Image: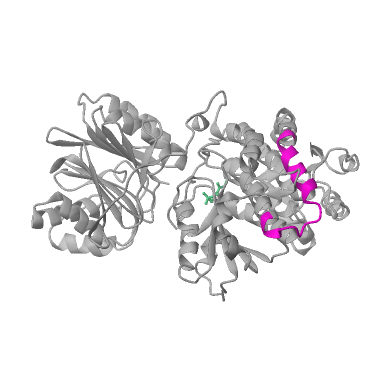
Amino acid sequence: MCGIVGYLGNRNALGPVVDGLKALEYRGYDSAGIAYINGGDCRVIKKAGRVEALEKLVRKEKAVPKLALGHTRWATHGAPTTQNAHPHFNHDKTIMVVHNGIIENFQVIKDRLTELGYQFSTETDTEVIPHLIEYHYKQSGSFEAAFEKTIQELEGAFAIVAISSLAPGQLFAARLSSPLVLGVGEDEFILASDPSAIMEHTKKVIYLEDYELAIINHDSYKIRNFDRSADVKKTAEELDFDLELAQLGNFPNFMLKEIFEAPQTIKLATLGRIRPASGTVKLGGLVDVKEKLKLIERIIIVACGTSYYAGLVGEYLIEELAHIPVEVQLASEFKYRFEPFSPSTAVIAISQSGETADTIAALKKIEGRHMLRLGIVNAVGSTIARMTDAGVYCHAGPEQAVASTKAFIAQVCVLAEIGLHFGNGKMKDRKNFLRELDNLPKKAEAVLAQADKIRKIAEKYTHFQDFLYIGRRYGYPCALEGALKLKEITYIHAEGYAAGEMKHGPLAMIDKHFATFAIAADCPLIEKIYSNISEIKARGGPIVAVATEGNRQIKKMVDDVIYIPKTLEQLQPILVAIVIQLFAYYAAIKLGRNVDRPRNLAKSVTVE
Ligand code: F6R
């Protein structure tokens, strides 16, 4: 979703701001803009479309400003036009504002300001902010006070950065439910929605919390709690973010790079945590809540999208490994649902970005209910990582492509580890399980070695407009995730279904124009999966299947087979995930799609 960058320092601010916007492109956006202060003047440049187009305009600027801000917009209020792009400003362009989130009471503010003679030129909620700052500035004569007063009046979710020729050496920022990080460099400050726009310049960061605002001068900064109107003492912490991991290397795009990181992802998610020789699992992130974990009798997993599907795999894993009942809920439903809770229930939030608005809202819903809140998060220091009582990091490194790939793999690894941790000896053959998990990177390599074969198969299926993904048990969430991957990056209609449901409806759709992707890796229900496949074949439906190496029978039943190495059924989702990701990826490339930034989607969904 929208990305924000702000810069105040000794360099030409346009460089770090444009570079920062490029680093944030992966979040998804439809227009971009920058504003800067040079001498006593404010200048703004905006453009619908890519940052590249904006950069061409910015390069023509002769000024060398030391203070600037930039924004990539993912439209919520108003069409994705140049006019609606950020920054937004007041009537004489002395105040420039960028904003991520939604101002829920913008109409009330707009009506009030309109009555006072203020005029608006865009359809956005953001435009009320510079006008309201101007209004308060006229009352108090202090820009700092006007900024704080304005922020206090806003309702909703926001990260806001402002600059003004009325305060030409200062950068202003505020946050409520939308991420904002301040990088503290040598003689410079960089503000951004996430560390990927900062890490090139400094590893020292301050995460702004809800209700915090920052006033940044050339050589100092001040953080205030705008709810309490009080100063807050904060010092910079070290960023745990590997720059190399965020760069493309020899890959044509981030999605392929991230799929190929699967073996390393498994290693990083298990490193130092699993001990196959002793059959033990050590999760440092759960040590502090060791005693509370012993009292847990029920687990609710909340997440969205791919993380939700990883949660569904986790349901099977934790129930089987730990014998604790697990329920997986979409965060967007959980937060509006009435249900009885007890303190013996733990809620596990799964999120790659750690910034997904619905997942954050789900955690907020249970605040004060004395329930343990755990996180399985990839982005270190993100909101969810900080708001949970304890958790286990995925350690998958930055995921840049919009479609989640390696994060799913890391999440499933962590869920298996949590299952064993909770199980505390309930599973009979822990050593064997951990040995298999330890060997999985090699098996993932073997799947990746078949990329070219998978490409050829995927390309054969790109003319289909409809796809059904089916699976049973651990294969069922894989089917859901396979369908999501296909639809989000190819735009082909795809549905995931439990194979056992075929006769309860979906079979009616099957004919030679409706293709099926069957998850048919070895499992106790393989014969039943064969029956489902036969029913589809009997109705002329083309089928591609993923099966376990050595399964000759399936070759005779389907049109194409992709094999994965033999492993435990509980760990199959990790290998199957690589196949479905590559299948969707190559189909999308064949169709000429932008795999890293599919249309209408954003990487982190920071609004409801
Ligand atoms: C799909 C995808 C999304 C995310 C979802 C949750 O490929 O990326 O469905 O999984 O938006 O995001 P996180 O995990 O960041 O909370």
Q: In the image, is 117 to the left or to the right of 394?
A: left
Considering every residue shown, the one lying at the far bottom of the view is 340
Give x and y (percent) for residue 531. Answer: 87, 54
Give x and y (percent) for residue 54.
Answer: 33, 32
- Assign the magenta stretch its main secondary structure: helix
Using residue 466 as the reference point, say whether residue 37 is left or right of it. Answer: left
The total of numbered circles placed on residues is: 0
Q: Nearer the viewer, residue 120 or 465?
A: 120
Q: Is residue 211 visible?
A: yes
Q: Quadrant of residue 116?
A: bottom left
Q: Is residue 292 left or right of residue 447?
A: left
Q: Position of residue 431 (x, y in %)?
A: 78, 47
Q: Nearer the viewer, residue 284 or 555?
A: 284
Residue at 62% in and 44% down: 410
Identify the magenta region: 421-442
Q: Where in the figure is residue 186, as x and y percent of width and height?
A: 29, 31
Q: Nearer the viewer, residue 279 or 224?
A: 279
Q: Which one is nearer the viewer's eye here, 275 or 342?
A: 275
Q: Is residue 594 above or below residue 115?
A: above
Left or right: 228, with 144 as reference point: right
Q: Which quadrant: the C terminus? A: bottom left
User: Residue at horizontal 60%, vertical 71%?
Assistant: 344
- Please check the rendered image and state whether residue 440 is part of the magenta-colored stretch, yes or no: yes
Asked if the stretch drawn in magenta spans residue 46, the answer is: no
Tell me, yes or no, if residue 304 can be seen here.
no
Q: Quadrant of residue 288?
A: bottom right
